[in-house]
Image: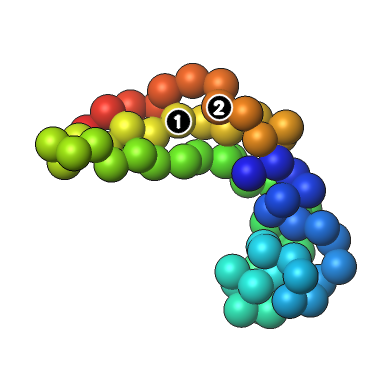
Amino acid sequence: MSDEWISNGLENNTDRLWKSVGGEMSLYNDITDNGFERVVGYIQSNGTINYKYVGANGYEINTVFNN
């Protein structure tokens, strides 16, 4: 989930952010202008969910919280 992986800036179907907001330009611009946090969730076999922040380079940086 690096910056490049999330959005390549092309505002078309090759841009994951653009696709995830359904091409809604006002929402796309709001996210790109104001920023976003990268969080990934892992569901363990016992049902526990662990969340971790991911840095701009795509690598996990810490655990947010466990459920």
Q: Position of residue 12 (x, y in %)?
A: 79, 76
Q: Residue at x 38, y 34 (%)?
A: 51
Of labels 2 and 1, earlier in sequence is 1
In the image, taking residue 32 as reference, residue 42 lies left or right, namely: left
Q: Quadrant of the N terminus?
A: top right
Q: Residue at x 74, y 66 (%)?
A: 15
Amino acid beneath label 2 = Glu
Label 2 vs label 1: CA separation? 6 Å
| Disc 2 + disc 1, Cβ < 8 Å | yes
The answer to which quarter of the image holds residue 26 is bottom right
Q: Position of residue 16 (x, y in %)?
A: 67, 64
In this rendering, the answer to whether 12 lies above or below 7 is below
* Residue sitting nearer the eye, 62 or 29: 62
- Please give the residue where the numbered disc 1 appears in the rendered image: 52
Q: Position of residue 46 (x, y in %)?
A: 13, 36
The answer to which quarter of the image holds residue 14 is bottom right
The answer to which quarter of the image holds residue 10 is bottom right
In the image, taking residue 33 as reference, residue 55 lies left or right, namely: left
Number of the label disc, if any, that sits on residue 60? 2
